[in-house]
Image (cartoon, grey):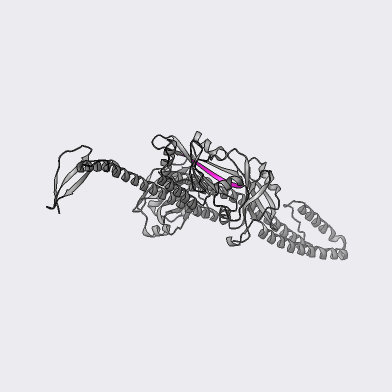
Amino acid sequence: ATVIQAAREYSAGRPLAPETRARLREILANEMSVRNIEYATLVGTDLKIIVNANKDRTGSKFDPEGLVGNVIANPRQITSNEIVNWEELQTESPPLPTGFTNKDALIRYVVTPVKDPATGTVVGALVSGDIVNNKLSIVEGTLQAFGNGYSAIYQRDANGQFQQATALNLGDSKDLKQAKTGVDLSSPELLQEVETAGGKTITRRVDIAGQTYTVAAKTLNNFKGQPVAVLVRGTSEAALNQQLQQGLLLQLLIALIAITADVALAVVLGRSIVNPIEGLSRTIKKFSQGDRQVRAAVFANDEIGAMARAFNDLADDVATSEAVLRDQNRRQEVFTQRAQLLTEVTLRIRQSYNTEEILNISVEGVRSLLKADRVLMYKFEPDFKSGRITAESVGEGWIKAFGQRIHDPLMSGSIERFKSGKISSIENLAEAKLSRCHCEILEQLEVQANVVVPLIVSDSLIGLLCVHQCSGPRVWEPEEIDMLQQLSTQIGYALTQSILLQQQQSTALQEQKTNYIVSRMRQFLNRQQIFDSVVQDMRESLAVDRAAILFIRLAMAGHICSRISRSQLSSRFRCDHC
């Protein structure tokens, strides 16, 4: 309410009161602290700063890359990654990350139009900025999601080269405290390749700090669609390659010993065993040239037959190891895509303060993340005996459940289990041991497999995030459960911020109404006029049918000295003191 009031006053050409300016500056500073950002600025429709949280720049023009002007001309929220030069940073004087100085910065701007609720016209824009450089919290989230590997963001400079903005290398460790900062790619040409890929994700095997990684990289574009940074995620292949190499060396050594022994016997026994050995040699050559289906023929149980069987075992192990590696690469690509989607969804819900928008973004994001048939938000009634579906994202062809009220009482044990944050999942409803009542509810929604995640806001259980698979049973992977746990936590944080903002707005509105009633009282000198003014303003402020003032006499009885209602009743009544 303070932000809208300030923008409206400025748009009307009226100067802001000092207390309004101070309160608005405090709100912007709190916003920076809560969201861990460096910019929070209210800009007028003339593109000049009304109030900002950093160094006072009131009256200065502020339109980074034309984002503010674009939002005012075409009202909607814009999110964009932009490069800001060092001179602009010195002018703004934001709190800079540790160790960051005398450099251009990569900033993620979010510009939101501020509208007059009475007319719907745009009266300003709220600009928030998040400096990416040296901010480890951005890349820590990716490492926490996957448990190991490398995560970095590289910033494009004025010469077209890419410089590291922030990076963490965890390697094969599971302890995030062991992660090393500032580790660069050994193949910078990958960044140039990504820049020309037209927004596609590029996957390569590269060396990082002496280890081989499977790396996925994608550009981050500014509002004009130009690449300004590259997002990099890598997974180490060291553990798998070490096991594969040891197994291959051991089995090759065994095969070499067997071949050597057979060659020695061939000299003694003559040509009777030369042909099988030559056949085995040809088989080995084909295998080494890439034919993974070829196997040696076993003619007997002698030494040559044993050698052929050893080779076949070796070939089976190599083929299996390569299949495992291919599967790992495939899973890595899937995990990289999910991590990127998870980051985008988290950013979107943390940037919104509207409860309905937060829930809609969440269900859409989860369904896209897990490729599920339906995702919905079920909000409990205070007694936990029923609830209502307040948000839903459902695939084409499946039943829509939005707005339905469901009677499904929770037992005390289930309530405590959900309050503790425990997630429940069903892979096949036909085999699940559930109550008949609960099964009927799921069957009506065509559910065959589901995951239920508790949604906790300010330590209170308010509802459930439900993921439904309707097309058939589904095995839920541990990584999918972990992602849902992380996302539910972020949703809880976002809803908590939304509730706090609504409370602040309500308090500000009540203070405004109280000040108005007091100012009106001071306009009259006659006691009856004061009473009439108070009850009139109280009824309108509280939106009630009747407001009255009871005057207490010493005789322990009272009468209405002023009253007003919608019917404007003129009669008075007495009330005895009890």
In terms of image quadrants, where is residue 534? top left
How far from the left and from the top, in percent, is residue 250? Answer: 73, 64
Q: Is residue 434 above or below residue 360?
A: below
Q: Farthest left residue?
A: 555
Residue drawn at x 40%, y 59% is 416
Closer to the camera, 186 or 82? 82
In terms of image quadrants, where is residue 540? top left
- Assign the C terminus to one quadrant of the image: bottom left
Number of residue marks: 0
Q: Is residue 496 above or below residue 535?
A: below
How far from the left and from the top, in percent, is residue 530? Answer: 23, 42
Q: Is residue 23 above or below residue 9?
A: below
Side (left or right) of 157 relative to 80: right
Q: Farthest front residue?
A: 525
How far from the left and from the top, in percent, is residue 273? Answer: 83, 61
Magenta segment: 105-113
Q: Is residue 119 above or below residue 440?
A: above
Closer to the camera, 230 or 97? 97
- Assign the N terminus to one quadrant of the image: top left
In terms of image quadrants, where is residue 159? top right
Side (left or right) of 507 relative to 546: right
How far from the left and from the top, in percent, is residue 220? Answer: 60, 44
Q: Is residue 301 shown to the viewer in this render?
A: no
* Membership of 481 in magenta stretch: no
Side (left or right) of 138 relative to 514: right
Closer to the camera, 113 or 462? 113
Q: Is residue 411 shown to the viewer in this render?
A: yes
Q: Main secondary structure of the magenta part?
A: strand
Side (left or right) of 179 relative to 535: right
